[in-house]
Image (tube, rainbow, N blue to C red):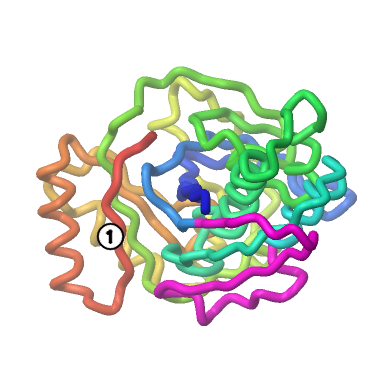
């Protein structure tokens, strides 16, 4: 059995530039990834069958049917590689559902990485990026799970060196789903300017206001994070409802996580570092 981590995605900044005729949006975003996330395991099957079992704290909220992104990724890779083998997959769902940290996209990307190893697929024989792109806007960024600047709908990726590796980060979610579609539809259509990767601290998340309008409980999370000692930045990730804070050091992050848990036992938290 082989194992892979589906690293949690965080948008340090996310600028919405335009609404496209096809219903998608032109975005500029700076993606970083936490050292932790969901866990995916797989062992080969000789009969070509693909199965998925889901467990973990949020496993009961996610279906294991054919439309699950892990199985969709597995089928797409199986077809592209002409792999005769199948796989028995187990997903340990640690990240909240519909939470703005790329849970489903990260799971799909992890499945592609994991099954490429499990089946002995040679990267030069397939276009793994194209498979990732066909599965969802965030899957290409999650495939590498490294700091990148993304444009378009997230498919135009450029490596950037921001010296954020190892930076302590705390994720907090009020455990309320925040569906992506309604949040994007709530964007006011105003282009507030380009995102400069080097000036990401001065950036913004243009989805934060429509997300707060949809899920008002996001605002207290942001206020709580911003008021913690040692915080250098507090912002919402993606389309919400997960928010994050960056810290001066791990001690400040650990102290902050303990304080958040004590004051808000119903919230989900995950302390980590940026990969």
Which residue appears at 76% of the width and 69% of the height?
Answer: 67
Which residue appears at 44% of the width and 63% of the height?
Answer: 95
The residue lying toward the viewer, choosing from 34 and 6, is: 6
Q: Residue furthest front?
A: 46
**Residue 59: percent from left, percent from top:** 50, 75
Residue 169 image-quadrant placement: top left
The residue lying toward the viewer, choosing from 13 and 89, is: 89
In the rendered image, residue 111 lying in the magenta stretch gets the answer no
**Is residue 6 depicted above or below 195 in this figure?**
below
Q: Seen in the image, is 230 located left or right of residue 191?
A: left
Which residue appears at 83% of the width and 40% of the height?
Answer: 81
**Mark 1 lies on residue:** 223
Q: Is residue 216 visible?
A: no
**Region rendered in magenta:** 40-69
- How many numbered marks does the figure carry? 1
**Residue 220: percent from left, percent from top:** 31, 67
Residue 98 image-quadrant placement: bottom right
The residue lying toward the viewer, choosing from 24 and 56, is: 56
**Residue 93: percent from left, percent from top:** 47, 66
Q: Is residue 184 visible?
A: yes
Q: For the residue carrying disc 1, how many other residues have a C-alpha within 10 Å: few (<14), some (14-19), or many (20+)? A: few
**Label 1 secondary element:** helix
Q: Seen in the image, is 151 located left or right of residue 58?
A: right
């Amino acid at each position: 059995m082989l194992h892979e981590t589906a690293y949690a995605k965080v948008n340090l900044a996310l600028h919405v530039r335009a609404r496209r005729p096809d219903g998608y949006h032109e975005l500029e975003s700076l993606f970083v990834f936490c050292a932790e996330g969901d866990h995916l395991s797989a062992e080969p099957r000789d009969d070509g069958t693909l199965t998925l079992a889901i467990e973990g704290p949020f496993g009961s909220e996610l279906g294991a049917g054919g439309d699950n992104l892990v199985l969709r990724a597995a089928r797409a890779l199986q077809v592209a590689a002409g792999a005769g083998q199948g796989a028995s997959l187990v997903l340990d769902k640690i990240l909240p559902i519909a939470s703005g940290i790329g849970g489903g996209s990260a799971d799909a990307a992890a499945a592609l990485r994991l099954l490429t190893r499990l089946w002995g697929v040679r990267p030069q024989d397939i276009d793994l990026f194209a498979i990732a792109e066909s599965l969802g806007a965030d899957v290409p960024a999650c495939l590498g799970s490294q700091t990148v600047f993304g444009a378009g709908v997230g498919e135009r990726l450029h490596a950037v060196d921001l010296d954020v590796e190892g930076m302590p980060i705390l994720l907090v979610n009020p455990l309320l789903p925040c569906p992506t579609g309604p949040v994007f539809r709530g964007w006011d259509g105003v282009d507030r300017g380009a995102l400069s990767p080097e000036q990401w601290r001065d950036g913004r998340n243009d989805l934060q206001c429509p997300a707060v309008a949809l899920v008002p409980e996001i605002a207290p999370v942001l206020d709580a994070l911003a008021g913690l000692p040692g915080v250098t930045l507090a912002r919402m990730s993606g389309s919400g409802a997960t928010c994050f804070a960056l810290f001066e050091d791990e001690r400040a992050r650990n102290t902050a996580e303990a304080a958040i848990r004590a004051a808000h036992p119903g919230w989900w938290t995950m302390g980590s570092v940026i990969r």
